[in-house]
Amino acid sequence: MRIIRRLHYWWSLVVAGALLLILGPPILFVAWLTGKHDLVYPWALFGGRNWLRLSGMKVQVTGKEHLDADQTYVFISNHRSYLDTATLFVYTGRRVGLLAKKELLNVPILGYGMGFVNVMAIDRSNRERALQTVEAATARIRSGRSFGVFAEGTRARPGDFLPFKKGAFYMAAQAGVPIVPVAIKNTDYLMGKGTGEARKGTIEMVMLPPVSTAGFSSDEDVRQLVNSVHSMIGKELGVSK
């Protein structure tokens, strides 16, 4: 019933808010007081994992066998739901930062805590600031930190798959690290953009074989890289480019 799905949606939002309020202030205060910012990351994983669980979501991950434990990657994923962010952050099997929209900085507690867990806000409405963020993220990747990026730049409507923006691909190419194409499935059905509804179910996250960025330096090289990764993810999702 639709009313049940709407109540489920609001329950998920309430759970997210409760986890932020219960876990956020004391952990961030201790991290700020001691200067030990690494204290925040395991709690962020705990919060993300339990938000999905308490929202009735299970996560099935395939493709981890493609990854080298000692390699830094840029994970590039499709984006159709709020669920995608927690899924990519928690279930890659490694410590991964994220590029996130700047509006998240305005969310109490969450906005303040983003910097503690290597989540960087990007202002896509301001080209100069966006480039500065991309350059800062690239420097972190060079230092050995993996990143996850939703290259569509926004959540797509259920069933849609939007063109990719190039920033994440330049990051990977300039840092000289492989790209892992990631297809996150079923989240548009479980909690799709604009539906105001949610259902219990299983999220599927498929990590495809890494794509080398070696030798990709020109704009045309990056354009080909964008098209290749977009096609790989689109094929896994069962949608055309």
Image (cartoon, rainbow, N blue to C red):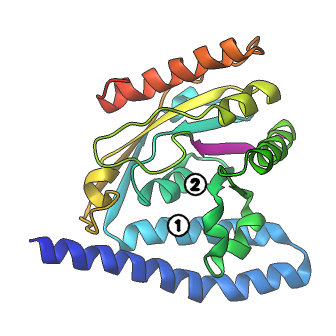
Quarter location, residue 142: top right
Q: Amino acid at mark 2?
A: Phe
Q: Confirm whether residue 209 shows in the render.
A: no
Q: Quadrant of the N terminus?
A: bottom left
Query: Please, what is the dominant secondary structure of the magenta stretch?
Result: strand
Are the residues at dot 2 and dot 1 in contact (C-beta closer than 8 Å)?
yes
Quarter location, residue 45: bottom right
Residue 53 position, x and y percent, is 39, 68
Q: Confirm whether residue 201 shows in the render.
A: yes
Up/down of 147 relative to 82, above or below: above
Q: Which residue sits at x=67%, y=19%?
A: 222
2 or 1: tag closer to the N-terminus? 1
Name the residue beneath numbered marker 1.
48
Is residue 27 one of those drawn in magenta?
no
SS state under label 2: helix
Quarter location, residue 76: top right
SS state under label 1: helix
Which residues are the magenta region?
Answer: 144-150
Residue 128 position, x and y percent, is 80, 46
Would residue 129 appear left or right of 43 to someone viewing this image?
right
Q: Amino acid at mark 1?
A: Gly
Up/down of 37 relative to 137, above or below: below
